[in-house]
């Protein structure tokens, strides 16, 4: 007999043992860098068997693309002389807001899936060790490699 | 109970819903659908359970499945209407409830739902008409009378609201709608201790019920201004949809960053630093507060024992 599945229920796959509370990828986005946190979100989405994975990936693309567009617009406005250099920190807040909103969106989607995953008895890993190692080792090692160009500004 | 039979599982789910065992009901209904995926009632009931659990995407999927399988099912329209209400699509909800009432004009449920919707929108005359229509169709359903009590409360007729709520609780002691109404009438009449008991009882019955939490906050605020504010703030942050929470937190973050930048630009470096530190403290607090709030709420719920005369 086929079991009836609700559309929002997770269907964990082979990566199930890597599943973690999305709070950890979320914190790592802020404390290690978006490149790390957003990649972790994608991995966690697969591990949880998230039914909203496509929307999560779309939001991650929006986070990166939106921040890049905001930064490019800012630099173009500066080049054209429409804004003063002192306005940059204020305008940078727009880029941060785009990135934060989309990341929060991914977090909320995954948090709902994670709640159901735990409800159905799924075991999750504690992400604190990865977060600490990321802050202590990965961030200082990788961040300089990203450079100070547009890519570095978006991913860092 | 024969678990190989969808009807038995649906009957079991109905019982579980009445007892507030939503997870059990969801399990029974998915079991029923595993046996008969075309069952309209199972899809619609499942939608109602999922609405209560705030799993709105799944609830909408189930309600629409019910409607696709049974476009003439009043219950399917009702379930979709409840999903619309939960998603704050009030016009669509009204249309669904009206459709349900047109298909099954003898049922009280669509009129009860419409009454509740109009009451929420402060359309008092229409609300009263629908509540009366619901009572006329099923005078024994206590939820219709509890809704009438709420209508009287909204009209500030405290005496009538209280007597109706007491009447409902006499017949159905766990009716959280009536408990809320009674709590509010007692609070407004200055009977704080009694209001507190009813508020806690209502929250205990329905921990996710926004009205019950609001009542508890109001009682707390009456007892201690500071504690009341704290409760209110937590309920404000935790309440509402995920999108609202995101907008709220990001708005707060941007506000703080903007203030900090402006203070630094105007030469108040120390003040800018203080604002930044205050924000970090708030962030730490926001991680801890929900746990504290829930623990405090649980403590409140454990402390209350009903008086023998309740």
Image (cartoon, rainbow, N blue to C red):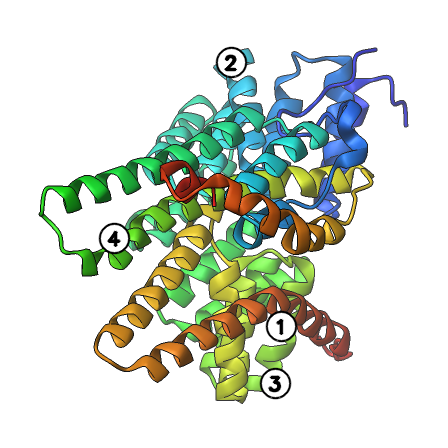
Between disc 1 and disc 2, the foreground one is 2
Whether residue B27 appears in this view of the structure is yes
Q: How far apart are marks 4 and 1 (CA)?
A: 51 Å
Callout 2 secondary element: helix
Q: Residue B170 at what x, y percent from top left?
A: 66, 64
Placement of B106 over or under A127, stated as above or below: above
Between disc 2 and disc 3, the foreground one is 2
Q: How far apart are marks 1 and 2 (CA)?
A: 42 Å
Name the disc covering residue B193, or none: 3
Placement of B216 over or under B75, stated as above or below: below
Name the disc covering residue A32, or none: none
The residue identified by callout 2 is: B68
Chain that bears disc 4: A
The quadrant of the rendering that contains the N terminus of chain A is top right
Q: How crowded is mark 3: few (under 14 residues within 10 Å), some or many (20 or more)?
A: some
Give the residue displayed 31% in from the left and 55% down from the top.
Answer: B122
Identify the mark nearer the N-term, 1 or 2.
Answer: 2
Q: Residue B175 at what x, y percent from top left?
A: 63, 57
Q: Residue B280 at what x, y percent from top left?
A: 50, 70
The residue identified by callout 1 is: B198
Give the residue displayed 49% in from the left and 62% down from the top.
Answer: B237
Give the residue displayed 82% in from the left and 40% down from the top.
Answer: A123
- Identify which residue, B177 or A130, lies in the foreground: A130
Placement of B29 over or under A154, stated as above or below: above
């Amino acid at each position: 007999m086929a079991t009836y599945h609700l559309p929002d229920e997770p269907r964990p796959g082979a990566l199930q043992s890597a599943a973690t509370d999305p709070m950890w990828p979320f914190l790592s986005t802020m404390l290690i860098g978006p490149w790390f946190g957003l990649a972790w979100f994608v991995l966690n989405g697969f591990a949880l068997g998230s039914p909203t994975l496509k929307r999560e990936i779309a939001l991650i693309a929006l986070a990166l693309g939106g921040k890049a567009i905001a930064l490019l617009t800012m630099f173009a406005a500066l080049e054209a002389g429409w804004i003063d250099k002192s306005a940059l920190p204020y305008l940078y807040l727009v880029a941060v807001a785009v990135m934060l909103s989309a990341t929060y969106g991914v977090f909320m989607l995954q948090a709902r899936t994670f709640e159901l995953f735990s409800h159905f008895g799924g075991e999750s890993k504690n992400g604190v060790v990865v977060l600490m190692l990321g802050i202590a080792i990965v961030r200082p090692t990788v961040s300089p490699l990203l450079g100070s160009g547009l890519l570095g500004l978006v991913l860092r | 109970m024969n678990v190989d039979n969808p009807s038995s599982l649906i009957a079991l789910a109905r019982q579980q819903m009445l007892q507030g065992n939503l997870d059990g009901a969801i399990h029974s209904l998915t079991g029923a659908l595993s046996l008969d995926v075309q069952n309209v009632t199972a899809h619609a009931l499942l939608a109602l359970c999922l609405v209560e659990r705030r799993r709105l995407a799944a609830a909408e999927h189930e309600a629409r499945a019910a409607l696709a399988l049974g476009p003439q099912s009043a219950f399917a329209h009702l379930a979709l209407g409840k999903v619309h209400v939960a998603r704050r699509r009030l016009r669509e909800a009204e249309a669904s409830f009206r459709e349900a009432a047109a298909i099954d004009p003898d049922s009280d449920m669509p009129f009860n739902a419409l009454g509740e919707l109009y009451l929420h929108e402060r359309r008092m005359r229409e609300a009263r008409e629908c509540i009366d229509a619901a009572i006329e169709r099923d005078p024994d359903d206590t939820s219709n009378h509890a809704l009438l009590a709420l209508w009287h409360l909204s009209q500030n007729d405290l005496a009538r609201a209280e007597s109706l709520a007491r009447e409902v609780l006499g017949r159905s002691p766990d009716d959280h709608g009536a408990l809320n109404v009674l709590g509010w009438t007692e609070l407004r009449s200055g009977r704080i201790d009694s209001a507190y008991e009813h508020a806690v009882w209502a929250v205990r019955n329905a921990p996710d019920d926004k009205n019950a939490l609001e009542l508890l906050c109001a009682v707390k605020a009456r007892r201690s201004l500071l504690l009341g504010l704290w409760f209110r703030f937590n309920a404000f942050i935790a309440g509402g949809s995920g999108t609202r929470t995101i907008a709220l937190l990001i708005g707060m973050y941007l506000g703080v960053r903007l203030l900090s930048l402006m203070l630094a630009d105007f030469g108040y470096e120390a003040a800018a630093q203080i604002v930044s530190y205050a924000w970090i403290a708030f962030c730490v607090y926001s991680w801890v507060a929900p746990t504290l709030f829930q623990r405090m709420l649980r403590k409140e719920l454990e402390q209350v024992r009903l008086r023998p005369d309740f």
